[in-house]
Amino acid sequence: MCFGSNDMHRKARESEEARRRKLADDLKRRDQSPAPAKPHTWLSRVIQPALAVLLLSLAAEGQAGVSGPALVGSVTIMQVNATDATFVFAGHCKGNAANFSMTLSPFDVSTTTAASLEGLSLPGKGPAGCLSQAGGENLTVVTVVTPQFLNLVSSITAGQVVILYVVP
């Protein structure tokens, strides 16, 4: 049996068209599949707790007088006047929101570094429901992630900070 040139081209063309249709159908099916979980949801459920545990273990090394549970979040410090600054923490403790603010006095934002924030005392700022139901325990900043630290002279943003309880 001998196929002519036209038959061979037709069969090759049909085969190529069938392959393209199958590829298009596969792409349509993939587009119709449910979207994966939002990255933020995945981050908040997996990465942030893992990061908190890692940072807590790193922070606790060589730190006498501090204990968990850890407060993990971000810090913003704004210079209010020549001697005072406002410290604002937005984060979590045991999966619950743990936000607070306080005045730091005397405090100079312009000369503050990530390293100089470590060891900063936050008296009476333990949030309710974290270590105790009432809250009000003394805290200290133990870790400031340097790549997420930005000093703009009149304000500071620290994107990832670990705060622990001071052990009496």
Image: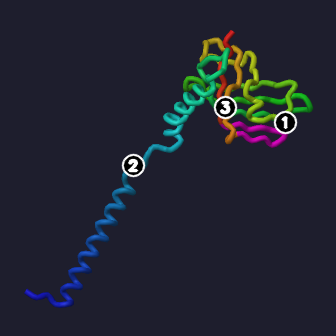
Specify the amino acid type for callout 1.
Thr
Q: Between disc 1 and disc 3, whose residue precedes?
A: 1
Quadrant hosting residue 107: top right
Quick check: 86 above or below 155?
Answer: above
Quadrant hosting residue 120: top right
Specify the amino acid type for callout 3.
Val
Residue in view at x 18 percent, y 86 percent: 7
Asked which secondary structure carries label 2, the reply is loop
Residue in view at x 75 percent, y 30 percent: 117
Find residue 96 and report its horizontal and vertical position in percent. Answer: 57, 25
Asked whether 50 or 137 is in front, the reply is 50
Give the CA separation, mark 2 to mark 3: 35 Å
Quick check: 22 above or below 135?
Answer: below
Asked whether 79 or 47 is in front, the reply is 47
* Left/right of residue 26 with respect to residue 156 in the rendered view: left
Q: Between disc 1 and disc 2, whose residue precedes?
A: 2
Q: Which residue is mark 1?
A: 111
